[in-house]
Amino acid sequence: MSRRDQMVNKIKELMYEPDYIRNIGIVAHIDHGKTTLSDNLLAGAGMISAELAGDQRLLDFDEQEQERGITIDAANVSMVHTYDDDEYLINLIDTPGHVDFGGDVTRAMRAVDGAVVVVCAVEGIMPQTETVLRQALKENVKPVLFINKVDRLINELKLDDTELQNRFIKIIAGVNKLIKNMAPEQFKDDWQVRIEDGSVAFGSAYHNWGINVPHMLKTNITFKDIIAYCNEDNQKELAQKIKIEEVILGMVVEHLPSPKVAQAYRIPKVWSGDIESVEGQGMINTDSTSPLAVMVTDVSIDKHAGEIATGRVYGGSIEKGSEIFFVGSMSKARTQQVGVYMGPERINTDAVPAGNIVAITGARGAVAGETITDADHNIAPFESLEHISEPVVTVAVEAKNTKDLPKLIEVLRQVGKEDPTIRVEINEETGEHLLAGMGELHLEVMIYRINDKGVEVETSEPIVVYRETIAGNSTNVEGKSPNKHNRFYIDMEPLSDDLMKAINEGEIKEGRVKGKEEAKVFQDAGMDKDDAKRVWDVYKNCIFVNQTRGIQYLAEIKELLLEGFESALESGPLANEKAMGIRVNLMDAKLHEDAVHRGPAQILPAIRKAVYGAMMLAQPTLMEPMQKVFISVPQDYMGAATREVQNRRGQIVEMGQEGDMATIESKVPVAEMFGFAGDIRSAAEGRCIWSTENSGFERIPRELQNPIVKEIRERKGLSPEPYGPDHYLG
């Protein structure tokens, strides 16, 4: 029997032993060495040759990933590792580090219980390190730390062992501070990473060696020895003595939880149902005989097999050929095959039990975030996935040949399914297809994939996504229905910063407010007690508060009223962009007593016009997306780099110095960031490292507002000037 077949049999066996399973993700800032580390772990498991580990990047199997040298999609792999004479099944997900593909990290974190956080010893903690750690901790995923590229500290920066240890202490303290700030209350101390217990490892993924304290005691190799090996250019021999895969996977087995341990505290966080129910208890106990509960975290399209859904099996077992039920879309499907991943290929099995990451073929209709259960059973859905950033750059996509139009629509829908952070808008009226993504690179990759699926497309120049808000208040604004029999009176004001923050951080959930018991979260965010009980709806960072008392028939039209409020926020009056940060208070209403005269055709326009009119009276303001830009350059080029930022309407937030390198933290509008990569390289003659992070929306400078509004309106085929309040309220 070949080594591969032995491994496949072992994987099938261990799948049923939740105590011997570890579901882990590898997370880090871009270029800190995640995929190189994954290669080493695969080589240790005998899946690729040891010589190629670090160069092959097996989990970057997409040709765009190989070409660009970055990870774009999260990749899954299952392997077997022997630790202290026991065998363990490690289900690993290698995630992207580039800010444009952060959505993949969010989805991967729902599928795993532990994360190996990789930090480059030279660069230290970077913005994206903080972001991916936040994503992990938000999903109750326990971290361990691997400090990578230690060889560069020795060979390039010539640090001795005392300086090395100081550098490490600084990184560990930084990671622990982030964990203390962001971990769930009960784990703030338990999840701290510590050198002495071996939850921190050091090494070089590229040169295939790694060490932590337990291994130092076992092998008697110290940092002084490591420095000697590196100085003598003898890292190959070092890699034989302290194998990186043994250190990292040993750390994973020792410090990261099995599904049996993790599901007990993760299920109450990620599942909205009753924990005492049969399925709730099944998930808490990782029971493979309980009702099926699968959370879909990813959907990909295979040229031969069609749609493949990846998900975490939290309860029950998913079987080949069984009928399954999608809780969100209330539809059924039949699984063709189920199995686990081994990098680019899948191993099919008869069933995949609780505690594993599954690949399902034939789950047509599945989308990321969907809950799957047995066909004859219905369960409460898993909590929806909240992506940390949202699409801020859009391109219009057209098929080169008109005969490809039906296929383009199909391919765009596929792309939207494969990557839920891409927003696809297909406008049937104008025939325009818009693709919104996290940044230039994100869209470039998506366009490449559309071409790859056999549809040649042309794209417009990238367009930035704006938002509309208000800077002032408006009171007693009247919205009339077309038949003049229904009238609504509203006040409008900007939403407080505390409420905005609570919505953005997920403390206040979006959607219709069901009961008064939710009032406490609004009160905690600084809202008046009486007002907090009267919130009806939270939509796109805006809220609707019903301040009326005893209005007859209001309850009957409540849903229509909120539908009109939500549709008004979808395209504001200033530039037809989405609105945010607005509080609408319904102060009074006059309604016709006959239900025939207060149908959708009357109520929807009435409330919509009231919202538009009130916005135009309350100093309507355009908001633009911002990015934090972090630049690290030699001192001599600091002036050139700061000029580059300031020429793009950027503000310098902070400047610092590490060794002979200057660090610049700045904030720049996304609209000014196109072409930045080339310009900053030439300004610093190629000697700079830079990265970006999305930073929400900020008000546009007043002098720029009118020309930008005009430009957006003309692009959308609207009149150059927005209508005044009288147009809506007359």
Image (spheres, rainbow, N blue to C red):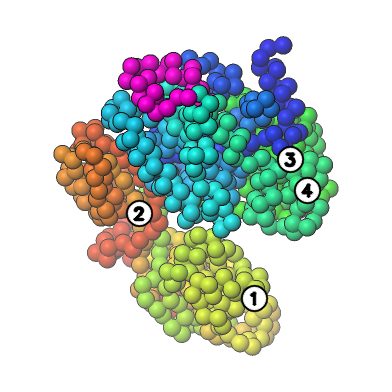
Look at label 2 and name its amino acid: Met
Q: Is residue 679 visible?
A: no
Residue at coordinates 46% horizontally, 19% vertically from top-left?
A: 239
Name the residue carrying label 4: 282
Look at label 3 and name its amino acid: Ala
Badge 2: residue crowd in 10 Å (few <14, some 14–19, many ≥20): many
Name the residue carrying label 3: 354
State the extent of the magenta-drawn residues as a range: 220-245
Foreground: 626 or 124? 124
Q: How would you classify the magenta stretch by its main secondary structure?
A: helix
Dot 3 or dot 1, earlier in sequence: 3
The nearer-to-camera label among 4 and 2 is 4
Name the residue carrying label 1: 516
- Where on the picture, by quarter, is residue 457? top left
Compute the Cα span from label 4 to label 2. 44 Å
Q: Position of residue 328 (x, y in %)?
A: 69, 52
- Asked whether disc 4 touches disc 2, contact meaning CB atoms under 8 Å apart, the reply is no
Is label 2 in a helix, a strand or a loop? strand
Badge 1: residue crowd in 10 Å (few <14, some 14–19, many ≥20): few
Badge 4: residue crowd in 10 Å (few <14, some 14–19, many ≥20): many
Is label 3 in a helix, a strand or a loop? loop
Is label 1 in a helix, a strand or a loop? helix
Look at label 1 and name its amino acid: Lys
Dot 1 or dot 4, earlier in sequence: 4
Is label 4 in a helix, a strand or a loop? helix
Q: Position of residue 453 (x, y in %)?
A: 53, 30
Badge 3: residue crowd in 10 Å (few <14, some 14–19, many ≥20): many
- Asked whether disc 1 touches disc 4, contact meaning CB atoms under 8 Å apart, the reply is no
The nearer-to-camera label among 2 and 3 is 3
Dot 4 or dot 2, earlier in sequence: 4
- Res 626 label: 2
The nearer-to-camera label among 3 and 1 is 3
